[in-house]
Image: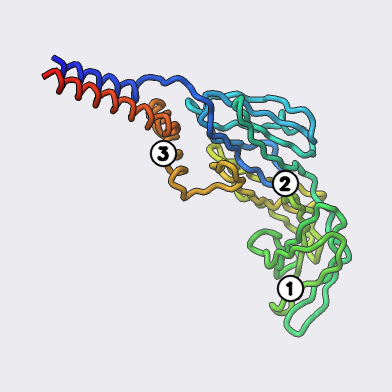
Amino acid sequence: MLKNKLTTSLILGLLMLFGVVIPAKASTVLAIQTLPSYINTRDFKLSCTSDASSVTFSVSKNGGSPVNFATLNPTATPCQVQVTPAQIDEEATYTFTVTDGSLSRSTSTIFDNSGPSSVSGYYKDGLSDGYRLHYHTPSDSDFDKVIIYRGDTPDFSADSSHEIATVNSSPNSDMTYEDHSGSGKYYNIRALDHAGNSSALVGDGGGTVTIVTTGTPSSTGGNVTIFPKEAGAGSVLGTEATASPTPELGSPQPDQGGVVNQINQFANQTPNPIKWILTHKKISIGIALILFGIAYYLYRMSKKNK
């Protein structure tokens, strides 16, 4: 009879551990996706990692007061929200924060969708085996680099198939570039800023300009797709800035290979009771040890009563 009670107690204890909702404890896991320093899109997914039952996302502009725009339960749904023009309404610095009531994490970015000025003073010198290009970079403070394109006719398309160089340089600088690909070539130069916005083309051409992008915004995870905007005529050159899809605690960059991270990734794909156990490993182990101790005590008592 005592053995049956012992067996029943042990089974009930295990059922409590794996099947019954355990009272919530203070959250210990909270992180937010790291955004690029500059973006030029206002529609993207922003994700977090949390073991809390409720988190709230807020946004502040230029250091102003934060405004809440989403609340969700990360244990029941993906810890991810959609950012829209309702949160990013003009060119400014934006700080996104996620909080669970006791912990909070933030990430900041600058929204910029205005293209830089074009390069100026363009001309080219003939070399024995090609050309030397001369140009002056724009004075825009956010100017980052130029892309140089080459074609065999004046109306060539300034697209990725004709791109020959990306040259990083400072604003308001005299620059040269040598191309040793033979004579009879034509060139166009495009300026880009830190957000990837594009200027109008300057060079030998003036014909067809092709619009190029590299993808569409991801619906599942931490990619922010940037669609550059020109200051004038010319093509739109798309770039994609990849942010960390699974933020790491205490660091802006994730550690995809850690054992704890792998467990947490597995936990995100499991049913809620097991997911709770995997994301609350210390308390789960403690409960298991208590149940083992009770079972062992009942076993010793049954031996004495024989």
Would you place residue 18 above or below residue 173 in this image?
Answer: above
* Amino acid type for the residue under numbered disc 3: Phe
- Secondary structure state at the residue bearing disc 3: helix
- Secondary structure state at the residue bearing disc 1: loop
Q: Quadrant of the N terminus?
A: top left
Asked if marks 1 and 2 touch (Cβ < 8 Å), the reply is no
* Amino acid type for the residue under numbered disc 2: Tyr
Q: Where residue 264 sits in the image (x, y, percent)? A: 45, 38
Q: Nearer the viewer, residue 175 or 293?
A: 293
Would you place residue 12 above or below residue 169 in this image?
Answer: above
Residue at x 76%, y 43% (from the top left corner): 113
Decide: few, some or many residues near mark 2? Use Cα within 10 Å; few <14, some 14-19, many ≥20: some
Q: Quadrant of the C terminus?
A: top left
Question: Furthest residue to the top?
Answer: 1
**Which circle, 1 or 2, is nearer the viewer?**
2
For residue 185, the mark is 1
- Secondary structure state at the residue bearing disc 2: strand
Decide: few, some or many residues near mark 1? Use Cα within 10 Å; few <14, some 14-19, many ≥20: some
Asked if marks 1 and 3 touch (Cβ < 8 Å), the reply is no
The residue under label 2 is 38
Question: Furthest residue to the bottom?
Answer: 128
Q: In the picture provided, is 23 more to the left or to the right than 29? A: left
For residue 266, the mark is 3
Q: Where residue 189 sits in the image (x, y, percent)? A: 77, 62
